[in-house]
Amino acid sequence: MTDDPDRLLAFWFPDGFDAFRQAWFERSDAFDAACREGFGALVVPAREGALDAWAETPRGALALLLLLDQFPRNLYRGSAEAFASDAHGRAVARRAVLDRRFDLALPATARIFLYLPFEHGEAMADQDLSVALFEGLRDIPAHAAPNGTIDYAWRHRAVIQRFGRFPHRNTALGRESTPAEAAWLAAGGGF
């Protein structure tokens, strides 16, 4: 186990903060295993607040948010534990982005990981904030392109606007799907 945010950032951004990595957004058993092996032991301490001191710097806040928002999704796919750190992640992201504007100290590709906790929230206010933050990346072609990060922020918002929650989480969270949600899921239910 390590308590070094720079080591975690070097793993997540091996080619630098500006380089996009497809592995972040597609299922990969190998990538999940690398996340688990290198940093899996930090996810629960991060969720419990033991690493909150990391949030005092832009790089530290970024590393902490990766542990709270991204790593659980890689380590605990299909279970409630994948979402167990979300509330803490949104609180850390609010302080980092809204109070301290740490996002402005990071390149655009790194910023998305400060904004994703809002995109992953099931409250409409979080979705509105997510879209506003991602829209701030509009002048960067890769983010504004079809299927870019801005497009995905709007798609997530549309699902929350329609259902008030993410139906694809229902099974993992022990929630019963409504008929409309079940139909959406049966039709592919994607973003």
Image (cartoon, helix red, strand yellow):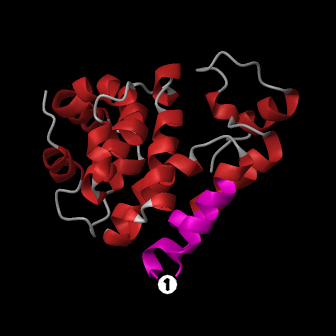
Image x and y of residue 187, in percent: 74, 40
| Residue 147 seen in the figure | no
The vertical placement of 58 against 161, above or below, is: below
Q: Badge 1 is on which residue? A: 139
Q: Nearer the viewer, residue 175 or 124?
A: 124
Q: Quadrant of residue 92?
A: top left
Look at the image and say whether residue 16 sits in the magenta stretch: no
Q: Residues within 10 Å of mark 1 (few under 14, many from 20)?
A: few
Horizontal placement of 54 versus 129: left or right? left
Q: Measured along the vertical axis of the image, is residue 102 above or below residue 69?
A: below
Tell me which residue sits at (15%, 52%) in the image.
Answer: 10
Which residue is situated farthest in the top direction here? 174
Q: Is 121 on the left or on the right of 55, as rendered?
A: right
The N terminus sits in image quarter: top left
SS under mark 1: loop
Residue lying furthest bottom = 139
Magenta segment, prevailing SS (helix, strand or loop): helix
Question: In the displayed structure, does residue 6 sit left or right of residue 163?
Answer: left
**On the image, which quarter does residue 36 sit in?**
top left
> Number of labelled discs?
1
- The magenta-colored residue range is 127-151
Whole-percent x, y for residue 42 in the image = 25, 28
| Residue 37, percent from left and from top | 18, 28
Q: Is residue 146 at least partly visible in the picture? A: yes
**What residue is rendered at 78% in x and 29% in y?**
182
User: Is 133 a magenta residue?
Assistant: yes
Three-letter code for the amino acid on which mark 1 is drawn: Asp
Image spot of residue 177 (x, y percent): 77, 24
